Amino acid sequence: MPLFGELFVSELLKKPALDPKGEELGRVRDFVVVRGDALPRVSALILEKKNTHYRLGWDVIGIFNKRIISSRVYALKIKPYEFSEDDLLIVRDIFDKQIVDANGAKVVRVNDIRLEGMNGSACLGAVDVG
């Protein structure tokens, strides 16, 4: 899959995800992250269209950059998504939350997350805090 070097999550929110014909599947609302990996990676995008949320697996994404997000599947193949507390979502669970800095010295607020392309995956590379 063609992949980016690095992007911030905020650059991708509300961007349209397209099917192979160029028709909009929905707009990016969140990212599902795999728990427990040494370098957390995105396993799916959560899209929204007409007030319905859909899960678009990372394995069916063809192009992923700040200009184009495209899928190798058509709208009929993606299923509605029901939010679950078991899923770790970047926007819902990490954005605008307070975390302790790497030195354990102070509490900071997460403003953004940098995604980095690595071996065909989008990995969480850094946190922008404020």
Image (cartoon, rainbow, N blue to C red):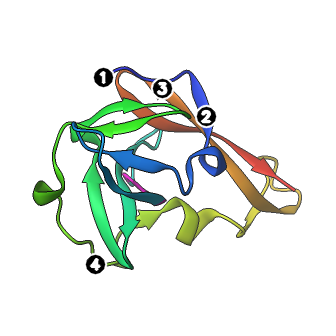
Task: Categorize mark 1 by other alpha carbons within 10 Å: few (<14), some (14-19), many (20+).
Answer: few
In this rendering, would 83 be left or right of 20? right
Give the Cα separation between the discs numbered 1 and 4: 27 Å
* Contact, mark 4 vs mark 2 (Cβ under 8 Å): no
Q: Which residue is mark 2?
A: 7
Q: Quadrant of residue 6?
A: top right
Q: Which residue is mark 4?
A: 82
Give the SS element for disc 1: loop
User: Quick one: label 3 or label 4, which is nearer the N terminus?
Assistant: 4
Task: Categorize mark 3 by other alpha carbons within 10 Å: few (<14), some (14-19), many (20+).
Answer: some
The segment highlighted magenta reads 29-34
* Contact, mark 1 vs mark 2 (Cβ under 8 Å): no
- Residue 20 visible from this viewpoint: yes
Q: Which residue is mark 3?
A: 117
Disc 4 marks a residue whose amino acid type is Glu
Give the SS element for disc 4: loop
Q: Position of residue 26 (x, y in %)?
A: 37, 59
Give the Cα separation between the discs numbered 3 and 4: 27 Å
